[in-house]
Amino acid sequence: MSQVSRPDRRVFLKLSAAAASLASCAPRSGSKPKSVAVIGGGIIGASIAYHLAQQGAQVTLLERGKLAERASRGTFAWINATWAKQPRHYHAFNQAGLAGWKRLQADLDIPVRWGGSLEWFPSADRQARLAEQIAEQVEWGEPARMISTRRFAELEPNVEIGETDQVAFSPNDGAVDPVLATHILAASARAAGATVQEACEVESVFDTANGRAQLKTNCGSLVVDDFVLATGAAPRVTQALAGIDIPQRSTPGVIVVTKPVSERLINRIIVAPGVHIHQRDDGRIVLGEQDGAPETAAHAERLRNRPNRFPDPVFAVQHAARILDLAEQFVPGMSSAEIEDVFIGWRPLPIDGHPVIGRSPRRSSAYLAIMHSGVSLAPIVGELVAKEIVTGRSAPEIEMYRADRSFESVRRY
Ligand SMILES: Cc1cc2nc3c(=O)[nH]c(=O)nc-3n(C[C@H](O)[C@H](O)[C@H](O)COP(=O)(O)OP(=O)(O)OC[C@H]3O[C@@H](n4cnc5c(N)ncnc54)[C@H](O)[C@@H]3O)c2cc1C
C-alpha cells in the first residue's frame, strides 16, 4: 500500500516528469530481489530508496510523519564541496555528491540552481586564511579562486560587501529546493517499484530465526532482509533499532524562506558574515543564520525537545526579522521581503563531523546512514548504499565512515 501526502501543483508536475522517465525502468530479472525497508523519508532516505529500487531491490520507505519535514526541510540546501569539507577524503566525497546532483538533474529533472557561491569574512586575518583555504581547494581540483570586488560587483550587482577587498568564488556550487527534491526522489522510487508509506513509525525490531528483521510499526509489521536507518537527528532511534549509540552533536539552525520576490536580487549563494542567502528559481529567498542559539540554560530548556517551531508565532516573526535585517546590510531591500516560513532545523551531526554509513556492528540487518551535509551528499550516498546492500560488496569511498570508528570530536560547523 502506498500513501503519500498530496504535493502542490509545482511538485506534481515534477513528479509526473520523473515518473515518466522511469516508466521503462523494469526490475531486474534473475535471483530473488533483496527486501529492504528504508526508515526515514528525508532527502537521504528518499535517495537511498530510489537508488535501491533502481538496482532491483524490493523497497519499502517508511516515514513517521510526512516526507521532508525534519532536517530536509529546515536546511539551507547549499550543494557544495568547499574548504570546510575536510580532510581530503571527505572533500572528495562531497565532490562526488555534486557530480551526483548533475546526474539526478538529468535523470529525474530535479531542478538545481547552479552558479557557485561567494564567501568572505570581515577580519583581515580570516580573509588571509580564506585565501590559503582556497589555494588548497585548487590543489584538490576545485576551480575555486579569490576574486576582486569589481568582479564580484559584475556577478552580484545587488550585493554590498563593505570594506572587503576579495571574495572566495566556488563556481561549482549550487542549491536545491530540498522538499521538492525529496518528493521527486520518493516518487521516482515508487515509479521503480518501491512502496512509500507516510505516518508510519518503526517502533521496534526483532531478529528472526533466519537472520532477517521483523519491524514493528504503528501501521503493521514487516519482515525484511535488511533495513536502513536514515532517521537523521534521532539518536534514540539508532540505539533502539540498531543497538548502537552514535555520538552526535545535533545543533539547531533557523531557516527563513520568503514569499517569491519578483526581482532577481541574488544570482549565487551568498555566504556573508553571519548569514547565508540564496534565491530560488521561483523567486523565494532562503536565509540561514550562521551562529546557533546562545548556550544559556533558558535556551537549553526551550530546545530540550528539539522543536521545529518557535513556541509562539510572534517569536518566529521576531527571529525572521532579525535574520532579514542581518541580510539587509548585504542585500539592500531584503528586509522588506514577506516571510513565508520560519523553521528550526536540527543537524544530524556525528561529533567528528563525518557521516556514519554502513552496517551496525550490533545488528547485521541494520544499516545506518546518518549525516550532516546530507543535501550535498544525498545522490552519492544513495548510490553507494544501494550498491553495498544489493551486491554485498564494500564501497571503498565509504570505508572511513563506518559506525565502529573511533569518533574524534572536531568542531567544524
Ligand atoms: C539549519 C541547517 C542547515 C543546513 N544546511 C545544509 C546545507 O547548506 N547543505 C547541506 O548539504 N546540508 C545542510 N544541512 C544538513 C542537511 O540538511 C541534513 O544532513 C539532511 O537534511 C539530512 O537528511 P536526512 O534524510 O538524513 O534527515 P531528515 O530530513 O531529518 O529525515 C529523517 C527522517 O526520519 C524520520 N524518522 C525518524 N525516526 C523514525 C522512525 N522510527 N520511523 C519512521 N521514520 C522515522 C523523521 O521523521 C525524518 O523525517 C543543514 C541542516 C540544518 C539543520
Image: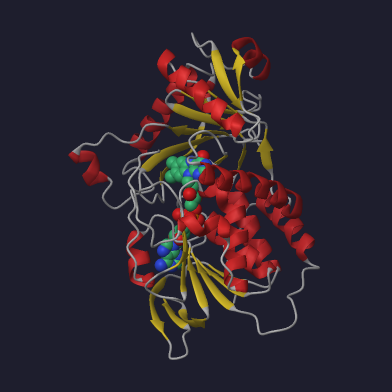
Question: Between 304 and 212, which is closer to the camera in this rendering?
Answer: 212
In the image, residue 349 above or below residue 153 = below
Q: Is 412 situated left or right of 261 in this image?
A: left
Q: Residue at x 42, y 20 (%)?
A: 126
Question: Between 190 and 342, which is closer to the camera in this rendering?
Answer: 190
Give the quarter of the image for residue 218: bottom left
Q: Residue at x 48, y 40 (%)?
A: 86
Q: Residue at x 61, y 30 (%)?
A: 138
| Residue 74 visible to an observer of this rendering | no
Q: Residue at x 56, y 49 (%)?
A: 377
Taking the view exactly as shown, the residue that stands out farthest to the front is 139
In the image, residue 39 above or below residue 276 = below
- How many numbered marks are there? 0
In the image, residue 40 above or below residue 36 = above
Q: Is 36 situated left or right of 205 in this image?
A: right
Question: Between 277 and 101, which is closer to the camera in this rendering?
Answer: 101
Residue 290: x percent and y percent? 41, 31
| Residue 153 visible to an observer of this rendering | yes
Quadrant of the drawing holding the C terminus:
top left
Give the quarter of the image for residue 302: top left
Residue 373: x percent and y percent? 50, 46
Residue 54: x percent and y percent? 69, 67
Q: Is 3 situated left or right of 128 in this image?
A: right
In the image, residue 16 above or below residue 335 = below
Check the image and tell me how it is coloured: secondary structure
Quadrant of the drawing holding the N terminus:
bottom right
Taking the view exactly as shown, the residue that stands out farthest to the left is 297
Taking the view exactly as shown, the residue that stands out farthest to the bottom is 209
Residue 195: x percent and y percent? 60, 72
